[in-house]
Amino acid sequence: MVPGSGTKQSLSALLRAFLRRRGPLRGALIRTARRAPELLGSGSTDLVRAFLRRSQTSEGGFAGRDGLADLYYTVFGMQAALALDAPLAIEPLRAYLQGFGGGEQLGFVSLCCLARGRALLRDAHAPLPPTPGRELAARIAAFRAGDGGFHSTPNSPHGTASAAFLAAGAWEDLRQRMPDAKRLAQSVKALATSDGGWASERGVPLGSTHAIAAAAAVPGVLASRADAEAAGRWLLARAHPLGGFTASPLAPMPDLLSTATALQTLAALGIPLEPVREPCLGFLDSLWTNAGGFHGHWEDDVLDVEYTFYGLLALGSLV
């Protein structure tokens, strides 16, 4: 449950700390995932490390669901490897990322992934030359929407929650100050829904778990304790009776993306997870396989590094 009046002071202090968050979002995600071995145990953690090693291709990047190196999945593979101190083939990885140059041929999501990948290499003490980073920022800025947010389609009138999340993270990763950042927060605030959540885009009447988690990560959106409590209530209402969290009020079953983002956001807001801890651990166990990865939901039969990172993030949030 959302804390009652007896814990308002501690929640307020936690929220102030959350609003004053220092350091990049990727650092917060990796620090959370780094706690996962406390619940996985050493044997299962070694299985994840082995899965990550198998998932790095000869090209240097990590494989997507088709088995080919993919920039999007490479980011998740790198984050998981850094969280577990799993060995990376650094030089092939550097060559793979450097092959994208300044992102001349990339769309919005891939540009943000390239910014994250370059930052993760820097975290791994294997940085790429800095010049393309400035080019990346300019290319990402070209996807700014008319309301100050971001959209994966250039010249869109309104931004989306996921694009705001990616753009805010990219500017952090590139170590640059986003121009007119207040307009980004205003764009995301406009996605608030009447049910107390946030929608992924304008015109959608119901909130979504991913959108509210994205909104919470954009500086300036959750500007008060009341905002944080409302977000917490909405997220906790998505907890499924059998464990995990659903993507929306209409979703029939929980999924790992929604579960990981909900737990990480609730934990960041200082909202106790004890009421959902045991059901969520059971849900995560139902998605785990001794091949070293996590499935995305009960009907998913493919393993990939993205959902495996979400599994680590969810476990780390529950420690």
Image (spheres, rainbow, N blue to C red):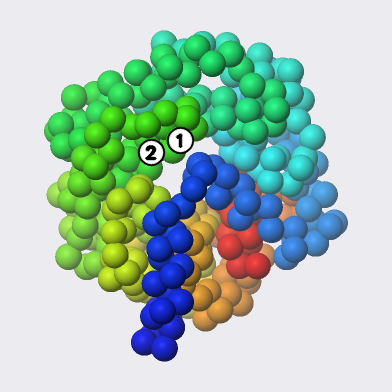
Q: Position of residue 190 (x, y in %)?
A: 18, 51
Q: Is residue 314 left or right of residue 14?
A: right
Q: Is residue 99 left or right of residue 88?
A: left
Q: Residue furthest right?
A: 43
Examine the image and state in which quarter residue 154 appears. Answer: top left
Height in image: 134 above or below 31?
above
**Residue 120 badge:** none
Q: Position of residue 309 (x, y in %)?
A: 61, 47
Examine the image and state in which quarter residue 302 appears. Answer: top right
Q: Which residue is mark 2?
A: 168
Q: Is residue 139 left or right of residue 272?
A: left
Q: Position of residue 18 (x, y in %)?
A: 44, 59
- Which of the pair 268/232 is nearer the observer? 268
Q: Residue at x 61, y 55 (%)?
A: 32
Height in image: 70 above or below 9?
above
Q: Residue furthest bottom?
A: 6
Q: Residue at x 21, y 44 (%)?
A: 187
Mark 1, residues whose alpha carbon is within 10 Å: few (<14), some, or many (≥20)? some
Q: Which residue is mark 1?
A: 172
- Can residue 281 be seen at all in this image of the molecule? yes
- Can residue 109 be seen at all in this image of the molecule? no
The kind of residue tagged 2 is Ala
